Amino acid sequence: MNLIQSFYKTKTLVSNGIFIAITVVILIVVGYFIPDSSPKIFSKQIYTLNGYNTKYNDHSEVSDFFLSIKNNNGFLVLGTSETTSIEGGNYYDFLNNDKDIEGKNFSLLAGAGRTCGVYIPLFLHHRDELDSLQLIYFINPAYWRDNLCEVDVDYWDRYSNYKMCTNLNLSAQERESFYTPVQAYNDKLNLFNKSVSYLEQIIRSARRNYFNDLRYYLFPEEYTSQFNFMSDSKIDYSLDLKYGNVDYELIDTNWNIAKSFTNKEWFKPINESVDYRYQELTSFVRLCKELGIKATFIVGPYNELFIKKYSPNDIDAHEKVVQNIKQLLINNNAEFIDATDISPVIGAFNDHQHHSSYGAYLIYLKIKYQLYEK
């Protein structure tokens, strides 16, 4: 007890606090003198990146990711939750394992709420590396619905960082052309949000000095180990009897959803009074053209049968949205694949807004035809 009391004396605590504070300051200062890790320019294509790499713009990792795709004449696939992993395979899985598409690989960045506007700051930080990059972006009409149609701070905070969004040198014309969705996010933040974001970036940079820059300087081989590269071996999906077929045992054909999906009330109607998603898409299309990105957009399907049964008055609004999206792409001379004819197909959906593996197969066929067989 006497030992504990002596250790917790105010004088001792003050001394320990001063020592820790001085040590932290020294480490931060010394960290700035550690050389930054630089891109290695790999011969193999990187499949995906850790979300923190893109959120905080870890420059060397992001640069290597983009350059590895370009140098291998590959594609970068972007999308929201429908473009994440699906049991049985998603459309990019089928593309990556198609033996007819030799020498072409499809890298991936996707997640719930990871819409095209989130990538604008990241792309602006990597202008020189993106020229001639081949890109596929999946447009899900569900993001024009009432709960998803506006800028969502939680989603932006998950994938981006306020400091990265504002640390950009843009002309007035550039701000007008493609910064609108980013500014909409910035305007949603209060002083506390912005302060936390700056603090996160500072901590990330200080940590990176030691856990990345110093580590890779001392052990350069470990830099490569952090990446997930494309595999040379291919999966033969055709061996699965369910490949390219509807699994009727799992599908509720009355609602055109998986039998396991029980939350029909999650469906929300289209909100025609908000045009944020149109602004976001327009800005991204313009940015791709400005940076020389070879972008192909997929206008995704919506679950027509479910909507007609659950909210029949909303079917016209969905059709109007997809027509508006297609017209927006046409007006901006953007190349796109129209997958909306999959909307009424039985078995193409797992729930009210996400396609199934069978739906992904149908989308894959459209992409393959557009890019290789047309």
Image (spheres, rainbow, N blue to C red):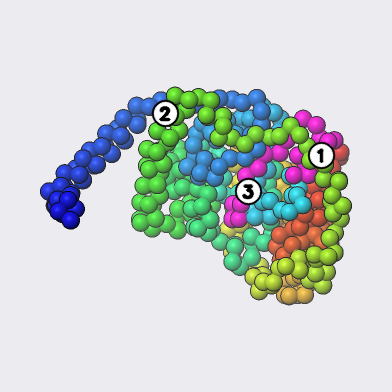
Amino acid type shown at disc 1 = Asp
Q: Give the range drawn in magenta.
A: 93-114
Mark 2 and mark 3: span between their CA atoms?
30 Å
Residue wearing tag 1: 98
- Please name the residue that numbered disc 3 is placed on: 110
Q: Quadrant of residue 149?
A: bottom right
At label 3, the amino acid type is Ala
Q: Name the residue under label 2.
A: 214
Q: Is residue 100 left or right of residue 157?
A: right
Q: Verify CB contact (< 8 Å) between mark 1 and mark 3.
A: no
8 or 295: which is nearer to us? 8
From the viewer's perspective, tell me whether residue 119 is left or right of residue 104. Answer: left
Query: Is disc 2 placed on a helix, strand or loop?
Result: helix
Question: Which residue is most to the front?
Answer: 1
Which one is earlier in the sequence, the residue at label 1 or at label 3? 1
Q: Nearer the viewer, mark 2 or mark 1?
A: 2
Say which of 23 and 109 sits in front: 23
Residue type, mark 2 in image: Leu
Label drawn at residue 313: none
Residue at the location (42% across, 28% down)? 214
